[in-house]
Image (spheres, rainbow, N blue to C red):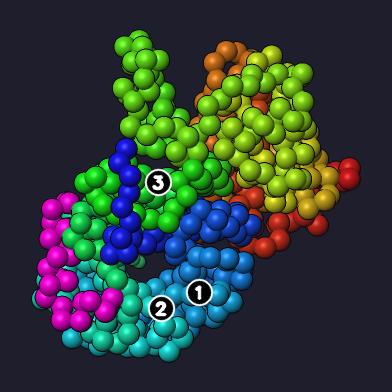
Amino acid sequence: MTAQTQSDKDRVIIFDTTLRDGEQCPGATMTHEEKIEVAELLDDMGVDVIEAGFPIASEGDFAAVNEIARRAKNSVICGLSRASPKDIDRCAEAIKPAKRRRIHTFLSTSPVHMKWKLQKEPHEVYEMVIGQVTRARSHTDDVEWSAEDGTRTEHDFLCRCVEAAIKAGATTINIPDTVGYTVPEEYMALFKMVRERVPNSDKAVFSVHCHDDLGMAVANSLAGVAGGARQIECTINGIGERAGNTALEEVVMAMQVRNDVMPYWTGIKHGMLTRASKLVSAVTSFPVQYNKAIVGRNAFAHESGIHQDGMLKNAQTYEIMTPETVGVKQTSLVMGKHSGRHAFEHKLEELGYQLAANQLEDAFVRFKALADKKKQIYDEDIEALVDEEIATAHDRIKIISLTVIAGTMGPQSATLTLDIEGKHITTQSTGNGPVDAIFNAIRALVPHEGKLELYQVHAVTEGTDAQAEVSVRLSENGRAYTAKGADPDTLVASAKAYLGALNKLTSKRGKVPGVENRIHSTDVG
Ligand code: KIV
Ligand code: ZN
């Protein structure tokens, strides 16, 4: 690895949009508390700008952006807004408590978007650009303007809009590849062209924002930087609309490892990347694919004999960066039922977790319970357990007990007791199979309209005593809520996963429905 020569002109601003574009993708909904936890980690990790949400979208979005703005220590806190004055003013109000704040306002400029989405003529769009940037500048000096669908925008019109936006006060100009359509050379040339043709282009920082529809988001982002952009918009684990956004960990490490050919640098503490990946995966319940670059489980695993032999002789034979660079610690401790609190804490540290004292306590109790049921506790078991701990820390509906009658002599039935906001309530339901019986019992105790969209089971490790990890996705009013549950008993894991998704769904609406007047229930609390 070459040493980095760091000149100011090569400093790349990292703009993280996990909490906005990332959260916008189906199923990745986060609760208020989860968003704050993610924002605090991003702030500590050295992210320059955190796009915390879209304040006009809902009261929940507003509250999350506002609270993140209040708590941020270093990062600029940014909110997204469309072109309307109401949107922009609401965004300004949400970010007001931040020490450093930015309004990001966008408008479509491509022919297809102007005609079908906005139903406006180019000259009207041009005027709106000036209006939206001027309005945003009345609230803050730090204004970003995005030409939505920029890569499919006609060049003359794009240059005119960019020039007008800068003249109206935009300090950052983003040219997004909204539909993931561009290729690296084309995107690099686009930035060169705009920067050369727009007379006042030196007054703004240019930004890339790429989607991964053709699997080129990271390559395109780096090409945009080679073309003169100095801000990259990205998300942890690459989550985002459709195929996702540019993965933060990938662009950061690409510039770090190949600094010889990409002499750019960022302020990201890359030793925290693994922890950030795990946290985002835990709170969104979006698994990280095993072979994902930088943060996938196999990213530093060497399976073949030839590779292992090479690694034993010199790690550089097959590793272009050490696992430690991105926060993966060499695991050493084997855990079992005799492992104490200190060893457990040490193991969590090795695995890249940092839990609050109360979460640590709960996780330790659950670890002990698991160790009683399962002889060997693998790292994957601990990861599943801790991910669940993080994801359920603020749940208002919790499982207390579950008994299921299954087998060939149906009907299958489930007796379930839940703790709903402190009250213990029990019901019994039957179903077409044990999982159906459990889900019917949950529906009886917490009536809701959520539609089950996904039910998936996989084993966390090998062997018949392995923990099952179940994923469930519920959807209601066009929003999807995904959660995972892990347990050596597949049926308990199923109940936990369904309740996880239901907790997210109900947290969007305020009070858990029907707690007071539930006909099937017996109050045992
Ligand atoms: O993909 C996109 O164009 C966006 C804009 C709002 C920047 O997310
Ligand atoms: Zn986007």
Magenta residues span 183-204
Which residue is denoted by mark 3 in the rendering?
A: 249
Task: Report helix, strand or loop for mark 2.
Answer: loop
Q: Is residue 214 visible?
A: no
Q: Is residue 506 visible?
A: yes
The one nearer the camera, 193 or 418, is: 193
Graded by Cα atoms within 10 Å as few (under 14), some (14 to 19) or many (20 or more), the crowding at tag 2 reads: some
Task: Report helix, strand or loop for mark 3.
Answer: helix
Horizontal and vertical percent for residue 119?
24, 77
The one nearer the camera, 190 or 318, is: 318
- Please state which amino acid type lies under the numbered disc 3: Glu
Task: Residue at 13%, 53% (x, y): give it.
Answer: 185
The one nearer the camera, 265 or 394, is: 265
Q: Is residue 469 above or below residue 121?
A: above
- The question of residue 254 being in magenta is answered with no
The rendered magenta stretch, by its main secondary structure, is classed as helix
Residue 132 horizontal side relative to residue 229, left or right: right
Graded by Cα atoms within 10 Å as few (under 14), some (14 to 19) or many (20 or more), the crowding at tag 3 reads: many
Residue 261 horizontal side relative to residue 356, left or right: left
Which residue is denoted by mark 2 in the rendering?
A: 142
- Please state which amino acid type lies under the numbered disc 1: Arg
Horizontal and vertical percent for residue 203?
26, 79
> Where, by quadrant of the figure, is residue 81 drawn?
bottom left
Q: Is residue 340 above or below residue 357?
A: above
Horizontal and vertical percent for residue 168?
30, 87
Task: Residue at 50%, 74% (x, y): give it.
Answer: 100
Which residue is denoted by mark 1 in the rendering?
A: 100
Point out the image quarter for the C terminus: top right
The span from disc 2 to disc 3 (Cα, nearest Å) is 26 Å
Q: Are marks 2 and 3 in contact (CB under 8 Å)?
A: no
